[in-house]
Structures are given as structure tokens and as C-alpha cells.
């Protein structure tokens, strides 16, 4: 028991270090690309100049100085601050500092993405938007996974039926992204039938009670969830139904039938269990792909998440926010892959976490 726990701990640390290294390398490349043209340097200098100006003008004695002398004082202290923060050093050295700030989401302030005249920390902007995206895409992913799983099992029992042929024929319609179907859903249910809202996350003004807020949230989630389901449901059902049909023709399934096991037990033990690793892998990469589609889908439904924030930041050339969004996506991808390793060990008895780190005698 102690040896297994030690192997599990060693394996967990090793995988976390490897994924962390991959995230660091990927983000460093993003930092190099983003800074082409000196964008990060411009942002950093602007923040330093603004801070120096506020500090100098806050002193009562300085407010009595002539504007020209006050500007000279600001310029001198700004140059000193540039040297203090290392902006006079080569970019290769400073790039690692930018990488550190990106990993911690300490990307300064954004003056473009605030409703008031002030500025706001980029980290706070991202963390305010992230829960909205997680709620929408987490719910959609779970619905899509379980619906396609049980529908594919049902289709594998009715191979060749009219509904099976209909799903096979309509599967190519899932090649269109979810936002494409979202436009038509808005036109039908919001513009014509007027039974569902056009977009947004809750009503304006938001309901004051928790129950009312939850009801409004669920009502606003219907169309975007339906759009994402339309963009991937039939293709997922078709792919998993094919896996189930392949495994149902194996010899051990025929042996289980000969032993008199029920069809439900055969499906659960000998068809569903061996295919789960492949299905879980497809599901995880489907989630990763849906994160990328969030950029357009959230804009179509005016959903206040990371996707719509990305579009807004690109339009306003807000480099810190764009870099922060890439950091969030990198963390989500690494976390998904990290969890996938342990899910394999839970659903597949042939996989043992930490087995690869043990030496063979």
C-alpha cells in the first residue's frame, strides 16, 4: 500500500512538472509573438509613466510648480523608473520577466475594458468572466457527453433501423460550428416565436432572489446549449455508435452471450467499458475544441464570458488581456490533460497510475 501511494505521488508530480513545462514553453512563445513590434514594452512604459505622473502630481508642493517644470520632473522620474524596472536591458532578459507576470496573471491594468473612467486589474477582469464561460461550456459538455453516449448505445442495439440510418445521414451536419446554428435558433425562437431571450446571461436588471436568478440563467442558457449540441451531437453519436458496433462483434462478447448474461450486463461490462478510454479522450478534446469556439459563440449570444472578452480585447488592441486569455486557455488545456491521466486509471483496469515509473526487475 505504501509503495503504491509512493508511486502515485511520484507519477503525479512527474506529470504535473511535464505539463507545467509545456505550458511555460507555449506561453513563452506567445510572449515572443505578442511583443513583436514592442507591444509589451509599450504597455509597460505606459503603466510606469501613468504611475509616476500620479505620484508626482499627488504631492501638494508639486502642484504649485509651472506645467513645464512639472513635466520635466515627471520625465526625469519616469526615466529613472524605466531603469529601475529594467526597461533599458535587452528584451531577451526582460522576456522572462514578462513570462513570470503572464503565468501569475499579473498583467497590470486595462483602461479599455472598464465601464467607468478608471482602470481595472487584468487578472480581475479575467476571473470575473471565467465563471460564466465555465458554467455555459461545462453544462453543454456534460449534456453532450451523456446524451451522445446513451443515444449511441441505443442505436447500436437497433443497427440498420430507420433512426440509425437517419443519424448516419445527418451526421455530416455536425461539421458546422455551434455559433452557425445559434444564429438560426435566435431567429426562430427569439425573433419569430419570441419565447426565449435574444442573448445575455440573465435578465436586466438581474432578479434579486437566488431562485429567480437561477431560473433566468437556465432560460438564457437554452439557446447556446442547444446550438452547441446541434454542432456536435450527431457526429458524436455516430462515432460512438461505430465503436460500440465494433466491440459488440468481439469473441468475448459472443462468449458472454453464450453464458446467458443479460444484454444490459454485456453492454456495461464488455462493450461500454473497453470503449470508455477512447470516448473519454474524444470528449476531452471536444471540450478543448469548444473552448476555441467560445470566442464566436459567446459573441453571437452576447454571453459575458472569456470568448466575448477576447473579441472585445482584439478590437481594442488590449495586449495584456489578450495575453491573459491565452494563459487561461493554456491552464485549462493542461488541467484537462492532467485529469485525463487519472480518469484512464479509474475506467480502465488495464491502466495503473504510476506503473510506468516503476522499474522492472
Image (cartoon, rainbow, N blue to C red):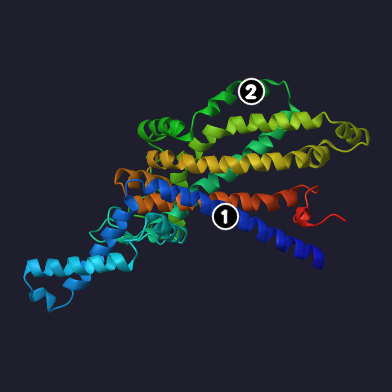
> In the drawing, does residue 135 fall left or right of residue 53?
right
Vertical order, 322 against 223 (above or below): below
Number of residues whose C-alpha sits closer than 10 Å to that of mark 1, classed few (under 14), some (14–19) or many (20 or more): few
| Residue name at image x 22 percent, y 69 percent | 77
Closer to us: 308 or 360 = 360
Mark 2: give few (<14), some (14-19) or many (20+) Cα within 10 Å.
Answer: some
Judge from the rendering whether residue 282 lies leftward or rightward of residue 157; answer left or right.
left
- In the figure, 102 relative to 148: above or below? below
Q: Earlier in the sequence, mark 1 or mark 2?
A: 1
- Mark nearest the camera among 1 and 2 is 1
Which residue does the image show at 38% across and 55% down from the upper left?
91
Classify the position of the C terminus by image quarter: bottom right
Residue assigned mark 1: 21
Query: Residue 190: x percent and y percent?
Result: 38, 36
Q: Residue furthest right?
A: 259
Question: x, y percentage for residue 208?
Answer: 38, 60
- Marks 1/2: CA–CA distance: 42 Å
User: What secondary structure is found at the residue carrying circle 2?
Assistant: helix
Q: Residue furthest bottom?
A: 61
The quarter holding residue 58 reads: bottom left
**Residue bearing the label numbered 2:** 168
Q: 316 or 140, which is in the foreground?
A: 316
**Image quarter of residue 147:** top right
Does residue 305 appear in the picture of this structure? no
Query: In the image, residue 321 lies at what x, y percent?
Result: 37, 52
Please, is residue 245 above or below residue 18 in the view?
Answer: above
Q: Nearer the viewer, residue 289 or 327?
A: 327
Amino acid at each position: 500500500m505504501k509503495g503504491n501511494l509512493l508511486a502515485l505521488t511520484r507519477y503525479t508530480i512527474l506529470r504535473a512538472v511535464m505539463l507545467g513545462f509545456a505550458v511555460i514553453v507555449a506561453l513563452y512563445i506567445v510572449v515572443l509573438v505578442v511583443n513583436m513590434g514592442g507591444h509589451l514594452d509599450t504597455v509597460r512604459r505606459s503603466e510606469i509613466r501613468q504611475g509616476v505622473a500620479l505620484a508626482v502630481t499627488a504631492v501638494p508642493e508639486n502642484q504649485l510648480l509651472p506645467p513645464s517644470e512639472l513635466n520635466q520632473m515627471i520625465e526625469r522620474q519616469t526615466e529613472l523608473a524605466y531603469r529601475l524596472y529594467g526597461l533599458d536591458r535587452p528584451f531577451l532578459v526582460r522576456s522572462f520577466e514578462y513570462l513570470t507576470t503572464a503565468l501569475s496573471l499579473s498583467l497590470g491594468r486595462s483602461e479599455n475594458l472598464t465601464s467607468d473612467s478608471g482602470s481595472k486589474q487584468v487578472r480581475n477582469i479575467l476571473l470575473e468572466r471565467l465563471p460564466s464561460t465555465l458554467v455555459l461550456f461545462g453544462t453543454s459538455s456534460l449534456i453532450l457527453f451523456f446524451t451522445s453516449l446513451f443515444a449511441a448505445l441505443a442505436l447500436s442495439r437497433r443497427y440498420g433501423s430507420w433512426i440509425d440510418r437517419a443519424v448516419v445521414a445527418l451526421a455530416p451536419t455536425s461539421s458546422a460550428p455551434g455559433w452557425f446554428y445559434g444564429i438560426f435558433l435566435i431567429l426562430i425562437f427569439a425573433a419569430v416565436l419570441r419565447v426565449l431571450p435574444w442573448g445575455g446571461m440573465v435578465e436586466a436588471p438581474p432578479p434579486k432572489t437566488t431562485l429567480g436568478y437561477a431560473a433566468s440563467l437556465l432560460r438564457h442558457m437554452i439557446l447556446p446549449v442547444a446550438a452547441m449540441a446541434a454542432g456536435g451531437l450527431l457526429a458524436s453519436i455516430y462515432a460512438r455508435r461505430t465503436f460500440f458496433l465494433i466491440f459488440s462483434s468481439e469473441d468475448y462478447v459472443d462468449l458472454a452471450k453464450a453464458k446467458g448474461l443479460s444484454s444490459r450486463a454485456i453492454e456495461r461490462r464488455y462493450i461500454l467499458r473497453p470503449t470508455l478510454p477512447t470516448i473519454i479522450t474524444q470528449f476531452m478534446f471536444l471540450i478543448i475544441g469548444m473552448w476555441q469556439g467560445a470566442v464566436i459563440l459567446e459573441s453571437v449570444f452576447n454571453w459575458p464570458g472569456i470568448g466575448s472578452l477576447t473579441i472585445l480585447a482584439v478590437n481594442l488592441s488590449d495586449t495584456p488581456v489578450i495575453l491573459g486569455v491565452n494563459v487561461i486557455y493554456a491552464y485549462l488545456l493542461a488541467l484537462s490533460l492532467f485529469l485525463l491521466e487519472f480518469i484512464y486509471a479509474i475506467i480502465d483496469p488495464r491502466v495503473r497510475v504510476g506503473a510506468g515509473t516503476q522499474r522492472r526487475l
